Image (cartoon, rainbow, N blue to C red):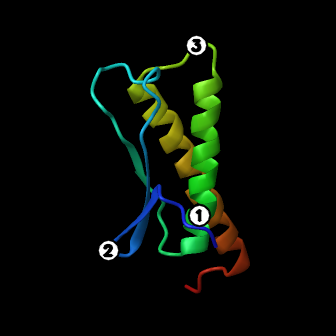
Amino acid sequence: MARHSHLHLRNVAWYWRRRPPRDLSSSGQKAILGLSLGTSDRRLAVYRGIALDFALEEICAMTNPRGDQTIRGLLARLRNDMLLQAETERAIVSPAVV
């Protein structure tokens, strides 16, 4: 599997970190977008990181780009949707024993 420089393992969880393009940054500071991928599995982290990369590229391609906080919100919503989907699939495959 290829190395993904935007994925970082911290303790046992993978994190996604990217620097947004300058034209999207509302302030002159170098902002870094970062989200926990909610997994310790590298393959799943790569999959989720690639999905977040594509989402960031789509945001960059918008004709009316949004501010930093809105970009973070959109990416966090996508990440939360991926986590919810994974939990739903896990619940369907192996129902919890009460």
Q: Secondary structure at mark 3?
A: loop
For the residues labelled 2 and 1, the Cα–Cα distance comes to: 17 Å
Residue 69, quarter of picture = top left
Q: Quadrant of the C terminus?
A: bottom right
Q: Which residue is mark 1?
A: 46
For the residues labelled 1 and 3, the Cα–Cα distance comes to: 29 Å
Residue 2 visible in the displayed image: yes
Q: Secondary structure at mark 2?
A: loop
Farthest top residue?
64
Q: Which residue is mark 3?
A: 64
| Nearer-N-terminus badge (1/3) | 1
Numbered badge on residue 94: none
Of the pair 54 and 79, the residue shown nearer to us? 54
Q: Residue 33: where, in percent of width, then height?
A: 40, 41
Around disc 2, counting alpha carbons within 10 Å, would you say few (fewer than 14), some (14 to 19), or many (20 or more)? few
Task: Please state which amino acid type lies under the numbered disc 1.
Answer: Val
Task: Say which residue appears at 61% left-offset and 39% top-offset.
Answer: 55
| Nearer-N-terminus badge (3/2) | 2
Image height of 45 relative to 94, above or below: above
Residue 55 placement, left or right of 23: right
Q: Secondary structure at mark 1?
A: helix
Q: Residue 83: where, in percent of width, then height?
A: 56, 58
Task: Say which residue appears at 42% left-offset and 25% top-offset.
Answer: 22
Of the pair 72 and 9, the residue shown nearer to us? 9
